[in-house]
Image (cartoon, rainbow, N blue to C red):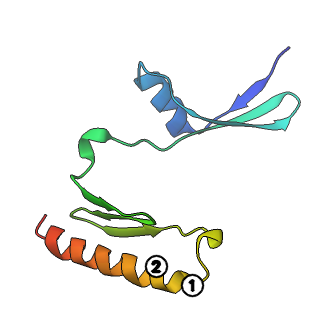
């Protein structure tokens, strides 16, 4: 069976330049034609140091470029999620105040 694989110039250069495998997705355009799209690169050496604070329902992350608060509350857990939100945000705010000189 003969197939055609379509990929961008950047992905082609990246495949040739690295000895490692390039991860990505392949979608089928037709029975004989496929399209490859590489996942974005994350350079671990460029990642910024971060501080992280976890509670039961949230994770707060602080680094030099960004402050992030992620919260997830299952609906079955409580009838009033606003109390949990206020408590978690207060804890996160205290953590950010301490971590800001990062």
* Distance in Å between CA atoms under marks 2 and 1: 8 Å
Q: Is residue 92 above or below residue 36?
A: below
Name the foreground residue: 44 vs 83. 83
Binning the other alpha carbons within 10 Å of mark 2 as few (below 14), some (14 to 19) or many (20 upward) gives some
Mark identifier at residue 84: 2
Residue contact at pointers 2 and 1, CB within 8 angstroms:
yes
Binning the other alpha carbons within 10 Å of mark 1 as few (below 14), some (14 to 19) or many (20 upward) gives few
Which residue was labeled with disc 1?
80
Q: Is residue 22 above or below residue 63?
A: above
Which residue reaches farthest right? 31
Name which quarter of the figure residue 19 lies in: top left
At 27% from the left and 48% from the top, the residue drawn is 47
Please, what secondary structure does the residue beneath circle 1 have?
A: loop
Which residue reaches farthest top? 1
Residue 52: where, in percent of width, then height? 28, 58
Residue 87: where, in percent of width, then height? 38, 80
Name which quarter of the figure residue 51 lies in: bottom left
Please, what secondary structure does the residue beneath circle 2 have?
A: helix
Name the quarter where the N terminus is drawn: top right
At 23% from the left and 71% from the top, the residue drawn is 95
Name the foreground residue: 100 vs 80. 80
């Amino acid at each position: 069976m003969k197939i055609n694989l379509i990929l961008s110039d950047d992905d082609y250069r990246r495949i040739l330049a690295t000895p490692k495998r390039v991860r990505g997705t392949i979608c089928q355009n037709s029975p004989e034609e496929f399209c490859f799209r590489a996942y974005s690169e994350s350079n671990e050496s460029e990642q910024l140091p971060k501080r992280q604070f976890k509670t039961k329902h949230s994770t707060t992350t602080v680094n030099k470029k960004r402050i992030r608060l992620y919260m997830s509350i299952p609906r079955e857990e409580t009838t009033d999620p606003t109390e949990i939100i206020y408590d978690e945000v207060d804890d996160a705010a205290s953590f950010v105040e301490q971590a800001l000189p990062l």
